[in-house]
Image (spheres, rainbow, N blue to C red):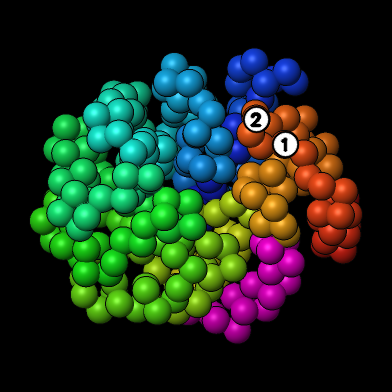
Amino acid sequence: MFSGSYVAIVTPWKDDCSGIDFDKLRELIEFQIENGTDGILPGGTTGESATLSHEEHRELIKRTVEYVGGRVKVLAGAGSNNTTESIGLAKFAKDAGADAALVITPYYNKPTPDGLLKHFAAVAEAADLPIMAYNVPGRTGLNMSPETTARIFNEVEKVVAIKEAGGSVDQVNSIRALCDITVMSGDDALTLPMISVGAKGVVSVAANVIPADVKAIVAAALAGDFAKAQELHFKALPVMRGMFVETNPIPCKTALKLMGMLNGAMRLPLCDLRPESLATLEKTLGAYGLL
């Protein structure tokens, strides 16, 4: 079920960050669908999941499913370093009508391979929903090895995919050599090379800003037109890199603000871009024709 360009969508806050601006969320979802995005991920890292209350997280999933209305897939963020909490989010996602859940490797705890297997098995069994595992060692302090990924895929029926954001194409090589799990890139700049070794698409940050272009790169690569995909990739690469001039999603939300699509509000401990980073981002977006 996982293929193409999924967006890890930002969470739009009210101006004072007191809650989610659901009218703006609907607008952002429509923008994504109109530009060819294949799936929406609410409540991921880019959606500031760490500062969502439990009630907000659930309402975000529910409203996303409602606004999407079955037109594209909804991959609900259901990650936590607390297995019981992740189970609750994944079960809610299923009941709300989400197509699948994204479950990150538990951060801070740094579980062993056995602990990882038991964590994913517990979530998958309780929720009875397709699960995309999420490996992002830069956030969690833990790199899930290809061997552990293959073991989880082979032993936990509902874990059908992995969002691989370890920054290594060779890790994807190793995963694909060991098992048939669906791999989705978790790093926009590595999507094209990851597809060349068997990945099926991307869960993208940059698609918040340039959804049609990210979709075009993935579509060309999956069709085997790597010359076209490479041309599009290098065109979009400055914007992809621009999304990480500081901690994600600060640059992404700032870009959307500069484009007149968002107020740019972020909850602490995230804060505004530093002036030098803002100047860099403005130059990048201007050169791309987004401003």
Tag 2: Cα neighbours inside 10 Å, few (<14), some, or many (≥20)? few
* Residue 240 in magenta stretch: yes
Vertical position of residue 286 compared to residue 46: above or below:
below
Decide if residue 60 is on the left or right side of residue 117.
Answer: right
| Residue for badge 2 | 268
| Residue for point 29% across, 67% down | 145
Residue at point 30%, 34% (across, down): 82
Q: Position of residue 53 (x, y in %)?
A: 48, 21
Viewer-side residue, 110 vs 173: 110
Give the amino acid type for the residue marked by disc 1 in the picture: Cys
CB under 8 Å between callouts 1 and 2? yes
Measured in 3D between alpha carbons, the distance from the residue under mark 1 to the one under mark 2, in whole angstroms, is 6 Å
How packed mark 1 is, by other alpha carbons closer than 10 Å (few <14, some 14-19, many 20 or more), is: few
Element carrying mark 1 = loop
Residue 289 — which label?
Answer: none
Q: Which residues are magenta?
A: 223-241
- Number of numbered tags placed on the structure image: 2
Horizontal and vertical percent position of residue 165: 46, 61
Residue 263 seen: yes
Left or right: where 113 falls relative to 74: left
In magenta stretch: residue 93: no
Q: Residue 87 occupies which quadrant of the picture?
A: top left
* Residue 188 percent coordinates (x, y): 57, 63
Residue 84: quadrant of the picture: top left
Identify the mark at residue 271; answer none if there is no mark.
Answer: 1
Q: Amino acid at mark 2?
A: Leu
Nearest to the observer: residue 61 or residue 245:
245
Q: Main secondary structure of the magenta part?
A: helix
Which residue is located at x 84 percent, y 59 percent? 280
274 above or below 164? Answer: above
Q: Secondary structure at mark 2?
A: loop
